[in-house]
Image (spheres, rainbow, N blue to C red):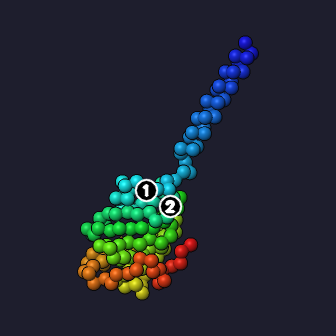
Amino acid sequence: MSNFGIMKKTVAFLVLGTSVLMLTSCGGGKFQKFQTSEQMNTPFNCSGLHMRNAQWHFVDDFGQTVDAIGTCKKGMKHGNFKFSINGTVVAKTKYNKDIEIKSVCMLDPKNSVSLAFCMEQTAKSNIANIEPVDAEDDSDFLDEE
């Protein structure tokens, strides 16, 4: 009878341990290191992502088709993001833990403005007047971390 009791306790312990292991490995603290096509075709949001070169393709509040690329760390926007319209970089924004630190608008790259203001001004202007900017040239932007 005592062997049955020990076996019963062992099985209960294994079931409980397996359940706890499954909950911790599938749940909190894990972030995706890739994007699904659904995530790419929405306004930029790093929720659940931990990766470099995350990409988004969406229509902004001003009717512009925007391509964005940047780094997600632990589910937050973190680092430099580039925003392009029709293949032309129109804004570069630095984020730190989901907070916009600095945005440079290519309409006036010498002054820092908010990303929303930049996108609004870009929509009001003629995008053809913006000189193409080399996407790899970050010399006028904040250093990478």
Q: Circle 1: is it few (<14), some (14-19), or many (20+) Cα within 10 Å?
A: some
Picture mark count: 2
The structure residue drawn at horizontal position 50% and vertical position 67%, both measured from the top left corner, is: 78
Q: Amino acid at mark 1?
A: Gln
Q: Nearer the viewer, residue 117 or 95?
A: 95
Q: Position of residue 54 (x, y in %)?
A: 44, 63
Q: Amino acid at mark 2?
A: Met
Answer yes or no: is residue 74 visible.
yes
| Outermost residue, right side | 2
Q: Secondary structure at mark 1?
A: loop
Is 73 left, or right, of 62 in this rendering?
Answer: right
Q: Nearer the viewer, residue 68 or 111?
A: 68
Q: Circle 2: is it few (<14), some (14-19), or many (20+) Cα within 10 Å?
A: some
Res. 41 image quadrant: bottom left
The structure residue drawn at horizontal position 66% and vertical position 29%, both measured from the top left corner, is: 13
Vertical relation: 41 (above or below) 23: below
Is 61 left, or right, of 71 in this rendering?
Answer: left
Vertical relation: 137 (above or below) 71: below
Q: Position of residue 106 (x, y in %)?
A: 37, 81
- Whole-angstrom CA distance, mark 2 to mark 1, is 9 Å
Q: Which residue is mark 1?
A: 35
Q: Position of residue 43 (x, y in %)?
A: 36, 61
Q: Position of residue 10 (x, y in %)?
A: 68, 26
In the image, which disc is placed on residue 54? Answer: none
Res. 8 image quadrant: top right
Vertical relation: 34 (above or below) 122: above
Q: Quadrant of the C terminus?
A: bottom right
Q: Secondary structure at mark 2?
A: strand
Q: Earlier in the sequence, mark 2 or mark 1?
A: 1
Q: Which residue is mark 2?
A: 51
